[in-house]
Image (cartoon, rainbow, N blue to C red):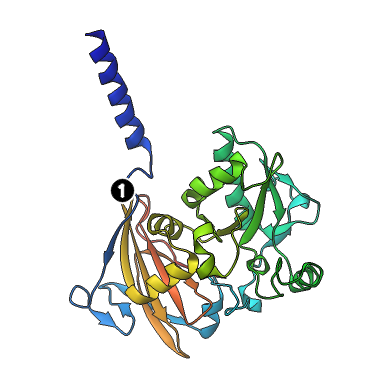
């Protein structure tokens, strides 16, 4: 009898643990829209109570979902405006080491990274280090000249020129075998980061496996990419193909839309919604509608900087 009581107790505890986990299965449910389900104007949906927003071509090159690779370089307006020296901002460099005193990063991304490593620390991971962050074009040029094309990208073609990416190391061992590397691979997506150059995506990204290079794309995008095993290239292609998807994560609904951008593009956004717009650095923008909060009826949207 005691054995059955003990097993029942373990089962209950297990159920409680699963229900407490905000990313318990299923992580993501995706509904693809079609024209019979939604009235469509151009590339976007029409909402009953909406506001019209004009999108300029410059918006294509701003935001957290920019694709930077050999075909899509960094534009000047793509660079984050809040780049800071981490060693000079001690409140940002919490929970990790810095390789040297000349590591720069977006202040916003540094806050998000600190939040992530704080969560890792609670699981016993205490040896994170940032080995590289933002690089301007001049620094990238020197690196490319010194290391060659086999180990560095030309200026303007590296994600490090954005301010959204950083190289993360372990103070104990190489990231490929370090517990910190394993944790990043398994958990970064929960905090809006992705492993940008996975081992199984080299043919798509064109970059060798880099277990140290992470990139911020934000929620819910990182969750969808993890669930569907997408590289950033594949995810942006998926959004462009589908045009509209509805995603449910932990009971909360997000809507994501792709809009091609021409010289004059207007899109419709719900007046009572919370939204964010990011370019893709190619030909359009992605609009993300977030779940409304319970303490307010209307929140202003945000255009990517």
16 vs 304: above or below: above
Mark 1 closeness class: few <14, some 14–19, many ≥20 residues within 10 Å: few
Q: Is residue 51 visible?
A: no
Residue at 43% x, 55% y: name it: 226
Task: Please identify the quadrant where the N terminus is shown.
Answer: top left
Q: Is residue 38 left or right of residue 66?
A: left
Q: Is residue 148 left or right of residue 123?
A: right
- Outermost residue, top direction? 1
275 vs 13: above or below: below
Viewer-side residue, 139 vs 304:
139
Instruction: Describe the element under mark 1 as helix, strand or loop.
Output: loop
Give percent across and percent down for residue 242: 32, 73
Q: Is residue 192 visible?
A: yes
Viewer-side residue, 124 vs 58:
124
Give percent across and percent down for residue 184: 55, 47
Viewer-side residue, 128 vs 44:
128
Badge 1 is on which residue?
Answer: 26
Task: Please identify the quadrant where the C terminus is shown.
Answer: bottom right
Give percent across and percent down for residue 60: 52, 79
């Amino acid at each position: 009898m005691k054995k059955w009581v003990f097993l029942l107790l373990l089962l209950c505890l297990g159920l409680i643990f699963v229900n407490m986990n905000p990313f318990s299965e299923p992580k993501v449910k995706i509904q693809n829209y079609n024209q019979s389900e939604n009235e469509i104007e151009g590339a976007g949906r029409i909402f009953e109570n909406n506001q019209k927003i004009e999108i300029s071509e410059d918006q294509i090159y701003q935001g957290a979902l920019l694709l930077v690779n050999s075909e899509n370089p960094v534009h000047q307006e793509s660079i984050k405006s809040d780049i800071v020296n981490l060693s000079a901002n001690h409140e940002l460099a919490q929970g990790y080491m810095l390789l040297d005193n000349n590591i720069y990063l977006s202040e916003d991304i540094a806050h998000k990274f600190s939040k992530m490593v704080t969560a890792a620390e609670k699981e016993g991971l205490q040896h994170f280090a940032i080995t590289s962050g933002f690089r301007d074009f001049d620094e990238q040029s020197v690196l490319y000249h010194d290391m060659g094309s086999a180990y560095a990208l030309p200026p303007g073609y590296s994600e490090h020129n954005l301010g959204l990416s950083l190289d993360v190391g372990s103070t104990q061992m190489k990231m490929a075998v370090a517990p910190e590397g394993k944790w990043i691979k398994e958990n970064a997506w929960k905090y809006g980061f992705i492993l940008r150059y996975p081992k199984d995506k080299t043919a798509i990204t064109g970059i060798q496996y880099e277990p140290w290079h992470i990139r911020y794309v934000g929620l819910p995008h990182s969750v969808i990419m993890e669930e569907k095993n997408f590289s950033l290239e594949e995810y942006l292609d998926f959004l462009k193909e589908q045009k509209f998807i509805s995603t449910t994560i932990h009971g909360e609904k997000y809507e994501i839309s792709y809009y091609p951008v021409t010289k004059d593009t207007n899109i419709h956004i719900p007046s009572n919604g919370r939204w964010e717009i990011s370019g893709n650095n190619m030909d359009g923008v992605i609009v993300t509608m977030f779940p409304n909060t319970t303490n307010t009826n209307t929140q202003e949207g945000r255009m990517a900087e």
